[in-house]
Image: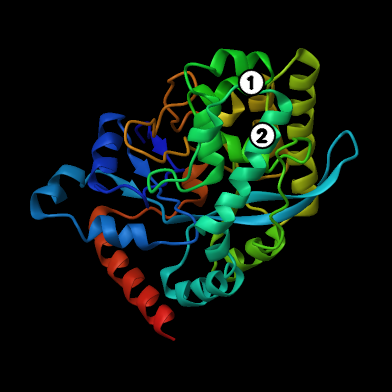
Amino acid sequence: MSKEIYGLHNHIATLKNKKAFLDEALEQKATVLSITDHRTLSSYYELFNSLEKNDIDKYKKLKFIIGMELTGMFPFTTIDGNRSNIAMDILAYNLKIENYAEFYHFILNNYQKLAYLDSSQYQQEELDFAKKVAKEIGYKVDYDNIKLTDDVPFAGYAISYGLTDPKYVDYNISKGLLEELKTNPRAFRNREMKNPDSQFFIDYSKFYPKVANIIEAIHNNEGLAFFPHTAAYFAKSGNEEKVKKAWDNSFKLTSDFLRCNPSINGLEIRHPSYLDNQTFYAYLQETAKLKDLYVSGGTDYHKSGEKITLDYNDNYIDSNVLTNVHDWAIMYNLDDMIDLSKEIDKITKRSLTK
């Protein structure tokens, strides 16, 4: 079997031209892709329904694994003894379309409050809180100009874009801002607002179900549940002691999660949040072997121009890295996905009208 190149963690819901994602994937030599938008498979229909005849030949060599990402709450005690509920993500792969109606019903029932979380009213409350904390820390920001807009509707993005303004970013990094935000501002919400050791921490318990319930729902669908970006919830910034503590918490979170959720099927062993930490890579790979877990990897692609198949050092995420993908993945060709996406759309529309 020839070497395969994977991109198994991608979000395309907000892309206006979803075919551009496939073009970029081909440019990055992808052979197997998964679209893992939050709480929906609708992007599969929007993408594959938009293909024209000439696109079929263009993309026909690509294979696809049906995926989705869902957020849930997990109780965690940091190494400093801070106990909080962390809003963390689970990747669902191999979702069975014939069981999708029941799974989508789970989503509709368990994420009803997200409309309020996404509302401009709530996001403004979050932004006001984040700006207050940033002032207390002493960050330099054009506070009056940090506002929610149609292009930046979420507080986590708005405050992060302000903190990483080229005029102030070096100063803010000297005050402890995460260096990673310079190239990945979206990381702010996971690294800070979901981090129980951060002054920016927000408890999202009222918005999300328990992680254990998500895993159960995935298994009821006959899908597989993976623990992604396990080091994403602690900011690796500040002095050497703070950075070490963040990594120690990442190791502990991974260990605690796997102990508390023994039915998890796999680990995401490549993700930008791992920052090329070879010790952490080795830990994830060894843990996957010891616990007989499947492995996955991706870049958390969200917008055009981002990496899809290339890791932190621009090495391909290939079958030499993800060694057991063929042991777990159900892969579909382009024609299959066109047919399956139509069924996804039918089920979604029926569920919404009930």
Taking depth in this image into account, of 200 and 38 the one nearest to the observer is 200
Q: Secondary structure at mark 2?
A: loop
Secondary element at tag 1: loop
Q: Position of residue 234 (x, y in %)?
A: 70, 33
Q: Which residue is mark 2?
A: 231
Q: What's the distance in space between the residues labelled 2 and 1, CA to CA?
A: 10 Å
Whichever of callouts 2 and 1 sits on the residue coming sooner in the sequence is 2
Q: Residues within 10 Å of mark 1 (few under 14, many from 20)?
A: few
**What amino acid type should be assigned to the residue bearing mark 2?**
Ala
Is residue 339 among the parts visible in the rendering?
A: yes
78 to the left or right of 120: right
Q: Residue at x 9, y 54 (%)?
A: 53
Q: Residue, x 59% and y 35% (percent of image)?
A: 188
Which residue position is annotated with label 1? 277
Q: Which numbered dot is residue 223?
A: none
Snapshot quadrant of residue 52: bottom left
Q: Residue at x 55, y 35 (%)?
A: 159
Q: Quadrant of residue 133?
A: top right
Tag 2 and tag 1, C-beta contact below 8 Å: yes
Residue 231: x %, y % from top left: 66, 34
